[in-house]
Image: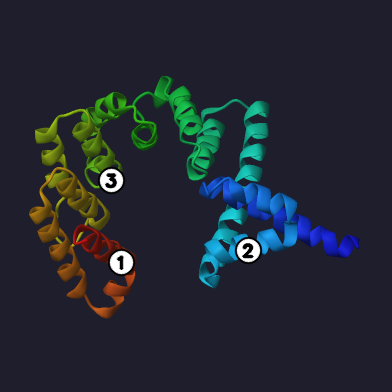
Amino acid sequence: MIRFYSPVFLLQLFCLYLVFSKGHESKWYLIILFFPLIGSLIYLYVHFYNRKNIDNITEEVKTALVSNYKISELEKQLAFSDTVANKMALADEHLAAGNNQQAYDLYQSCQTGIYSDDTALLLKLIKSGFLVEDYETVIRHGIFLEPNKEFSNAIEKTYYAWALHFKGDEAKALEVFTEMDVQFSHYAQRIEFARYLQKTEEKEKAMEKLTELYNEIESMDRHEKRMKKGMQRKVQELYMDYNK
């Protein structure tokens, strides 16, 4: 009996985790709790009958478990040795796990002494600050880094541009996005530019930008096109969304 119920119990926990993490209807808690095996199987069939989806969800659970373990170990390491390097490592793991506020607080605590104007730390503060909607601080760091060559090509510059947008400075936001709009490069930044154009009711310009990006990738040789496959897929998805 133990051999039978142990896997069912694990399946039940797995499904309850999915209901919580995916925000599915609360009725599934009761179905899974009162009918562990049948309820779990019905839940998986209704929401994830596609095998690829099941594999993806399983990977998400594995990643979450591994992430929690890494965070726990890094917290122990920080408790043993309270250094900026250990704080940064823990903050990086929190950010990767989606714990944005924890990451941001840790990055902020690192901004002392020789790290006050550290470029790598400021880039992390811009990203995590944007994710927790501290737009004023993002803008302050962005202004400071504007002359920095490393910042000019960084994806974090898009967070700076978006922060300007959310604080109502559209002229500056457009200027920053335009600075990153360089042909045959900066594809992630230019996709964000297209999103910005669509967000600001410049749909026609957004479509032109997406068409330009798609045509650039299509004109590449086979190797380059394969390297940009993910970007091309994002461009196609946005194009389809805008035409719904």
Q: Position of residue 9 (x, y in %)?
A: 77, 55
Left or right of residue 3: residue 111 = left
Left or right of residue 144: residue 12 = right
What residue is at 52 percent from the left and 50 percent from the top? 22
Q: Total of numbered circles in the picture?
A: 3
Q: Position of residue 34 (x, y in %)?
A: 74, 51
What residue is at 52 percent from the left and 33 percent from the top? 85
Viewer-nearest of discs 1 and 3: 1
Alpha-carbon span between mark 1 and mark 3: 21 Å
Q: Position of residue 188 (x, y in %)?
A: 27, 54
Q: Please, what is the three-letter code of the amino acid marked with disc 3?
A: Ala
What residue is at 27 percent from the left and 24 percent from the top? 136
Q: Quadrant of residue 121?
A: top left
Using a 10 Å C-alpha cutoff, classify the residue at mark 3 as few (fewer than 14 neighbours), some (14 to 19) or many (20 or more): some
Q: Which mark is residue 154?
A: 3
Local secondary structure at mark 1: helix
Confirm whether residue 186 shows in the render.
Answer: yes
Q: Earlier in the sequence, mark 3 or mark 2?
A: 2
Q: Is residue 100 above or below residue 57?
A: above
Q: Which mark is residue 187?
A: none
What residue is at 23 percent from the left and 54 percent from the top? 191
Please name the residue that numbered disc 1 is placed on.
233
Q: Please, what is the three-letter code of the amino acid marked with disc 2?
A: Ile
Q: Please, what is the three-letter code of the amino acid marked with disc 1?
A: Arg
Alpha-carbon span between mark 2 and mark 1: 32 Å
Left or right of residue 155: residue 60 = right
Q: Position of residue 116 (x, y in %)?
A: 37, 23
Q: Quadrant of residue 139?
A: top left
Q: Earlier in the sequence, mark 2 or mark 1?
A: 2
Residue furthest top as drawn: 113
Q: Which mark is residue 42?
A: 2
